[in-house]
Image: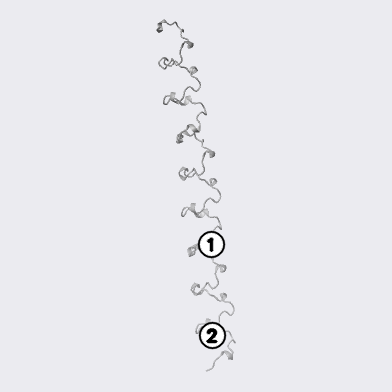
């Protein structure tokens, strides 16, 4: 019997043998979504690039569906990366924008001498009275570093002022302590007549020849 002997709608589902309908018997666009059994379409039934964005339900793509490296930077929405998404020690120097680390971002005591570049600490960064004696290198305080009149008697060590430090004619009479000038301090012929007080030369003070 050929097809022209069959009346319209004469072939019902119960007349069709199992596995009798192959892809050859199915017309293009004949199979609609209502005719496809649940879970009937597996991966091998999908053509390359057949699943487009509009075919994927919201929240359907889970982590296990993503291949390594699939989520590139342009796939991430602005502001989408929160603190909980960043692994410990994940942010390296190259990831920081210039000027990104402000004072508020730094923990107390996190800047040590290792983090300071040479000559980066200017005068305005040093608090008043912050530099104690132990911070000064031996010989660091040169003459030009000492303010005028800064050295008082308290700053002079015992016996530190020697003859070479005294300006000519700097030792006036008011600088001499009582009885400080003894005979060894007098130069030859230093005591002239005008230096001798009246009635000071007694017989005991004279030598007759």
Colour scheme employed for the rendering of this structure: one colour
As displayed, is residue 63 above or below residue 194?
A: above
As displayed, is residue 51 above or below residue 27?
A: below
Could you say which quadrant of the image residue 179 lies in?
Answer: bottom right
Crowd tier of the residue under label 1, counting other residues whose Cα lies within 10 Å: few below 14, some 14–19, many 20 or above:
few
Task: Give the residue drawn at x 43%, y 25%.
Answer: 44
Tell me which label, 2 or 1, sits earlier in the chain.
1
Residue 107 location, x and y as percent? Answer: 55, 48
* SS under mark 2: helix
Could you say which quadrant of the image residue 31 lies in?
Answer: top left
Task: Give the residue drawn at x 48%, y 17%.
Answer: 35
Quadrant where the N terminus is found in the figure: top left
- Name the residue carrying label 2: 193
As displayed, is residue 83 above or below residue 46?
A: below
Identify which residue, 206 or 120, lies in the foreground: 120
As displayed, is residue 42 above or below residue 30?
A: below
Task: Give the residue drawn at x 53%, y 62%.
Answer: 134
Residue 134: mark in rendering: 1
Crowd tier of the residue under label 2, counting other residues whose Cα lies within 10 Å: few below 14, some 14–19, many 20 or above:
few
């Amino acid at each position: 019997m050929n097809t022209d002997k069959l009346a319209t709608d004469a072939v019902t589902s119960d007349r069709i043998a199992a596995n009798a309908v192959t892809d050859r018997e199915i017309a293009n666009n004949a199979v609609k979504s209502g005719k496809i059994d649940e879970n009937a379409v597996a991966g091998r039934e999908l053509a390359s690039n057949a699943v487009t964005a509009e075919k994927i339900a919201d929240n359907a793509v889970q982590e296990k569906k993503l291949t390594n490296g699939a989520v590139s930077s342009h796939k991430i929405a602005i502001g989408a990366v929160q603190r909980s998404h960043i692994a410990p020690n994940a942010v390296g120097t190259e990831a920081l924008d210039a000027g990104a680390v402000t004072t508020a971002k730094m923990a107390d005591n996190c800047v040590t001498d290792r983090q300071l570049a040479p000559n980066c600490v200017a005068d305005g960064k040093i608090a008043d009275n912050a530099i104690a004696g132990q911070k000064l290198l031996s010989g660091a305080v040169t003459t030009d570093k000492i303010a005028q009149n800064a050295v008082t008697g308290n700053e002079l060590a015992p016996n530190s002022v020697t003859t070479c430090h005294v300006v000519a004619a700097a030792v006036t009479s008011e600088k001499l302590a009582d009885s400080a000038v003894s005979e060894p301090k007098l130069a030859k012929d230093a005591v002239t007549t005008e230096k001798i007080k009246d009635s000071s030369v007694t017989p005991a003070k004279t030598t007759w020849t």
